[in-house]
Amino acid sequence: MGKTDLIIIGGGAAGLMAGCAAGELGLKALVVERKHKPGRKLLLCGNARCNLTTNISENRMLQMFVDPVGRFLEPAIRGFTPSMLQRWFAAGGLRTVVKAGNKVYPHTERASDVLNLFTDRLRDKNVSIACSSTVQAVEKTRAGFRVTTGNFEVEGRYVLVATGGISYPKTGSVGDGQEWAKKMGHSVKPYRPGLVGFEVDPKVLKRREGKIHGMVMVDILSGDKKIAETRGVFEIEKWGIGGTAITDASRIMARRNLKGCTLRVRFENGSVEEIKPLRTRPIKEAMVTIGGVALAEIDCRNMESKKCHGLYFSGEVLDIDGPTGGYNLQAAFSTARLAVADIGKRCGKGGFKSLEKTAKRRMRK
Ligand SMILES: Cc1cc2nc3c(=O)[nH]c(=O)nc-3n(C[C@H](O)[C@H](O)[C@H](O)COP(=O)(O)OP(=O)(O)OC[C@H]3O[C@@H](n4cnc5c(N)ncnc54)[C@H](O)[C@@H]3O)c2cc1C
């Protein structure tokens, strides 16, 4: 049985960033991933182009997350801002570009390049990743934690759970982290699909079929009252309506537990249609899971559990979600770095400052 400073469970966006951050600080760390390759969901991001973040100030970004999520994420996002994220990728050799709507992508617009950067960096920083290894149990020991997979056991002083939500389960995120959290005394907020399409009356689909819709504005109406508005693409699917304007609306409705809303869609050509969603598509098709480990039980200043000393959480395993546009990856990356920074301090390592300086120098070239 091996021993290490930090065991990171999950090799998705949060786990890969955490592994790199641990390597930067010189921590002895291991990433454990259940799929045969890491970053399965990362590869799907932004239609395989990987919308890494949004190029806006951290204040604006926190507003867009909406409280209580925005409030919870404040230390993480301020510690690793959208512009720091872009500098981090540039320092690793992958420049970013800002596209329409302030969306930030790798300049190659290939998610595979993002994943390669992570795995190369893990290798260069001597952080191992054990793939095809499903963690079955996480137990507290006197010295830290014992993590058991089907193939091996490993002990670590600290554990970071980065196992994701429950959407797109084929990518490996099936809710295991939330189950361990429950066993360790945490509550888990109920799951709802976020960023997903709606099934609607087939008559709506017939009316709209074959038309080009482009950008639309959507008002979310509860009775006569406008609750919120979204803006983006509107698409007609076989089963209903989708596109970013609609999926963003689905997230707002789920987050606020709004039922029976009407969507007033304002098209570019001036026409307006009110659509009553029948139901959302299933959570396995959602881009983000709403619900997860309760935020009140996690210290937002370092991502450590308030219930179990030395146990940390990052990314979508927590009850956090953001709109489309790179917010969810930013949250995964920022929460991962905040957790590792704290673990680094406890293990007597310095902060990330030198990396930031290197990144700034490389940006100037
Ligand atoms: C189609 C699609 C497109 C998206 N596009 C974007 C986008 O462009 N921009 C954006 O910001 N967000 C996007 N998102 C959302 C974003 O991908 C997620 O919010 C983000 O990946 C969450 O990162 P995570 O590390 O928390 O979880 P995940 O990326 O889901 O990673 C969790 C990892 O943990 C592993 N794991 C789970 N259980 C175990 C276990 N028992 N043992 C070991 N390993 C385990 C899983 O196999 C997985 O690799 C998209 C999502 C989808 C589905």
Image (cartoon, rainbow, N blue to C red):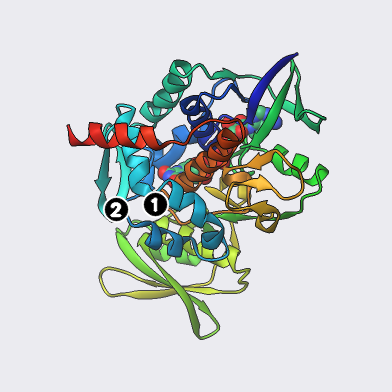
Q: Residues within 10 Å of mark 2 (few under 14, many from 20)?
A: some
Q: Earlier in the sequence, mark 1 or mark 2?
A: 2
**Residue located 26% across and 52% down the image:** 100
Can residue 333 be seen here? yes
Residue 49 is situated, as x and y percent measured from the top left of the image, at 35, 37
User: Quadrant location of residue 345?
Assistant: top right
User: Hey, what amino acid is under mark 2?
Assistant: Asn
Q: Which residue is identified by label 2?
A: 102
What is the spatial separation of the Cα atoms under label 1 and label 2, in whole angstroms? 8 Å
Q: Is mark 1 within 8 Å of ligand 1?
A: yes
Can residue 109 be seen here? no
Q: Are marks 1 and 2 in contact (CB under 8 Å)?
A: yes
Q: Is residue 351 above or below residue 249?
A: above
Residue 314 is situated, as x and y percent measured from the top left of the image, at 59, 42
Please tell me whether mark 2 sits on a helix, a strand or a loop: helix
Q: Residue furthest left?
A: 365
Q: Is residue 9 above or below residue 297?
A: above
Q: Quadrant of ligand 1?
A: top right
User: Hey, what amino acid is under mark 1?
Assistant: Gly
**Residue located 56% across and 58% down the image:** 72
**Taking 335 as reference, is 4 left or right?**
right
Q: Which residue is identified by label 1?
A: 325
Residue 91 is situated, as x and y percent measured from the top left of the image, at 31, 30
Q: Is mark 2 within 8 Å of ligand 1?
A: no
**Residue located 61% across and 40% down the image:** 164
Q: Residues within 10 Å of mark 1 (few under 14, many from 20)?
A: many
**Residue located 54% across and 66% down the image:** 67
Q: Is residue 348 above or below residue 247?
A: above
Residue 88 is situated, as x and y percent measured from the top left of the image, at 36, 35
Q: Which mark is residue 350?
A: none
Q: Nearer the viewer, residue 340 or 94?
A: 340
